[in-house]
Image (tube, rainbow, N blue to C red):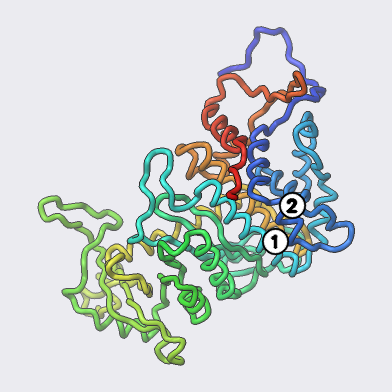
Amino acid sequence: MKLSHTSRSISAVFDEPNLVSSAGLVPEVALAEAAGLRGLAEEHLSVPTDKGANAGLKVTSLVAGMVAGADSIEDMAVLRHGGMSRIFAHAYAPSTLGSFLRAFAFGHVRQLDAIASRFLIALAGMTRLLGAADSAGSAPQTPTEYALLDVDDTVIEVHGHAKQGAGFGYSRVRGLNALLATLSTSASAPIIVAQRLRKGSCNSSRGAKRLVGDAVATARRLLGPEPVVLVRMDSAYYGRGAIGAAVAGGAAVSVTVRMNPQIKAAISGIGETAWTTIEYTDAVFDEAGARWISRAEVAEIAFTAFATGKRSEQVAGRLVVRRIPDFNAEQNAAAGQGTLFDLWRFHAFFTTADPAVLDTVAADKTHRAHAIIEQVHADLKSSALAHLPSGKFTANAAWLVLAVIAFNLTRAAGTLSGAQLAKATTATIRRKLINVPARLATSGRRLTMHLPQGWPWQTAWTQLFDRVSDPPAALAS
């Protein structure tokens, strides 16, 4: 590609009142309206004074700006250009939206959490985000599988001295800590079912009990009685609080454990014949023997978590252990200095998953896939969570919830556009479906958007637009 020299010169003038840069916001906002976002905010959000007036319109404006790529309050100006006022009403100025967020107290953030949960449930009912066959013909999830609920936190880096709650945590980066829970199935990409912003210096497990309880409850409302939810967490959440909340909600757990004396004693009780070779790094499959040739092995043993505590707090399950050779220790063993825990590196996790559904090998493979939540963290940080824009902690906490709403709304739009974008990242959906330029034209009191001829994703965009433009279903009498 090179610059065309057909014309002798090129000039640029910002004077076209009928252009919009993000035509994909039309079906996105229509989908948000159909799922009741504005009505939910008007009903449940009680931000005081004139700053909280028209809460539904302000929440929708903030979410729409994030969907279009805004990652700061100033970026909300993307909603106010060209012909945007012809297709959208009440797109608030960035200063008004900033004042709205700064009026939030902790209770208002919790109200917004409830709105996000209700909105997600409505979206799932309209778009079948979870557990349904896609247009490519994938089969629905069967009751013999688990729905996977992943819990983990991430540090969002911030700068400046005015950020309330900012501090240095485990990552040694100055920021605020966001705790998230995502839900996915074998037929769907993750959606976010619970979120909480915390101080940057907090322990990872702080508030996990409540968040896990909320996440499991929302997952059950999304999925119905089947399938069973499996909560996957790392060792920071191995405690009575988070595990107890999951079990109390009817979920199974799969949680990494630390190598304390109790765990080491349990591992020592596993016999050598119990270990099974698994597919792992550099593994080779032996077709003749129908097995993997690998130096990684797994085994399990019955285990009761928190056995020294109250009987009501004890949780019976399995300790699944993966071991790989410790190559540095092998050199010491050759010199006669080796012991069981010198020759191998052990990675153990506690699970209450049904062995009939997830045997030892399957449970290990499923637990390792917990890293999928890191992709959601990266997705958010490349979108609305690139910054936490306010100096006030509660405003940033509200910003996190709105970013989650925008994430789920974008995911829902991707599922409506067809199988190609059903599991795409926010950035991909934004590039292909949202940030599409259009020229507005009116004829016979009908507004028409003229989009670029030959747009590579025209079919997907049209499918999304047609789906949200369908008339609402008739109410049952």
Residue at the spot x=39%, y=79% of the render? 259
Q: Are marks 2 and 1 in contact (CB under 8 Å)?
A: yes
In the visual, does 197 lie left or right of 391?
left
Q: Is residue 371 above or below residue 467?
A: below
**Mark 1 surroundings within 10 Å by alpha-carbon count, few (fewer than 14), some (14 through 19), many (20 or more):** many
Name the residue carrying label 2: 59
* Nearest to the observer: residue 219 or residue 224: 224
**Kind of element beneath mark 1:** helix
The disc at residue 112 is 1
Query: Where residue 463 sits: x, y (%)?
Result: 54, 32
- Give the residue displayed 74% in from the left and 69% down from the top: 106
The picture quadrant where one finds residue 165 is bottom right
Q: Is residue 224 left or right of residue 447?
A: left
Mark drawn on residue 137? none
The residue drawn where x is 53% and y is 26% is 456
Instruction: State the residue in front, 81 or 26.
Output: 26
**Residue flagged by tag 1: what amino acid is it?**
Leu
**Front residue of 410 and 7:** 410
x and y, in percent, of residue 256 in the image:
41, 72
- Image x and y of residue 469, in percent: 62, 35
The number of numbered discs placed on residues in the rendered structure image is: 2
* Among the two numbered marks 2 and 1 on one chain, the one whose residue lies closer to the N terminus: 2
Residue sitting nearer the eye, 4 or 433: 433
Which kind of residue does numbered mark 2 sit on? Val
